[in-house]
Image: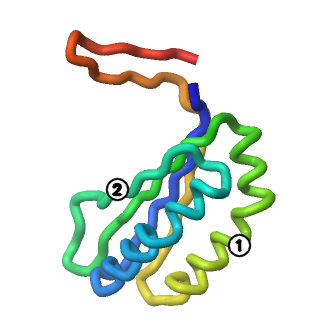
Amino acid sequence: MHDFFYAVTATLPQEKVCDYITWLEQKHLREMLLSGALEARMIICSPSTERSQDIETQYIFANELAYRAYEKNHAPRLREEGLRMFGSLPGVSFARRMGKIRLTEHSTLSGTSAQVE
């Protein structure tokens, strides 16, 4: 089981949302996978406001050690690119969170299954 979660929530003005999504889809998510993440997803959070939109990217790493290797070897470059492209724009902010995954449940046709670490 993969057991380490890392997420970044970007708050962007509405006029920059399409640019940010394009960057994520065409470049950044792929680079995260090449840098050690095993899964990557983008969530358009609701509700949005007339002025801003939250977009969360979530990444799953095999374990905390794999995440720490990403953080040491790849994160500075990837974070710098995102900040260079979007960080100086008015109304843009980023928040990070991470942690150990304790429980994963999956729906199956015959019921649910769960894995506990």
Q: Please determine whether, in this image, residue 83 is positioned above or below residue 111.
A: below
Q: Locate residue 1 relative to residue 23 in the image: left or right.
A: right
Quarter of the image with the N terminus in it: top right
Q: Residue at x 50, y 71 (%)?
A: 27
The location of residue 83, given as percent across then percent down, is 59, 80
Quarter location, residue 113:
top left
The location of residue 42, given as percent across then percent down, is 39, 57
Quarter of the image with the C terminus in it: top right
The location of residue 58, given as percent across then percent down, is 47, 51
Do the CB atoms of the residues marked 2 and 1 lie less than 8 Å apart?
Answer: no
Q: Which residue was labeled with disc 1?
A: 77
Q: Please determine whether, in this image, residue 62 is positioned above or below residue 58.
A: above
Give the CA separation, mark 2 to mark 1: 23 Å
Q: Of helix, strand and loop, which one carries label 2?
A: strand
The three-letter code of the residue at mark 2 reads Ile
Q: In the image shown, does 2 or 88 lie closer to the viewer?
A: 2
Q: Locate residue 8 relative to residue 4 in the image: left or right.
A: left
Q: Which of the numbered marks, if any, corresponds to residue 48?
A: none
The location of residue 6, given as percent across then percent down, is 57, 48
Q: How many marks?
A: 2
Task: Check disc 2: other Cα within 10 Å, few if <14, some if 14-19, many if 20+.
Answer: few
Q: Please determine whether, in this image, residue 22 is positioned above or below residue 47.
A: below
Q: Which of the numbered marks, if any, corresponds to residue 43?
A: 2
Q: In the image shown, does 67 or 110 lie closer to the viewer?
A: 110
Quarter location, residue 77:
bottom right
Instruction: Report the colour scheme.
Output: rainbow
Q: Locate residue 36 relative to residue 24 in the image: left or right.
A: right
Q: Residue at x 38, y 22 (%)?
A: 105
Q: Of helix, strand and loop, which one carries label 1?
A: helix
The three-letter code of the residue at mark 1 reads Arg
Task: Check disc 1: other Cα within 10 Å, few if <14, some if 14-19, many if 20+.
Answer: few
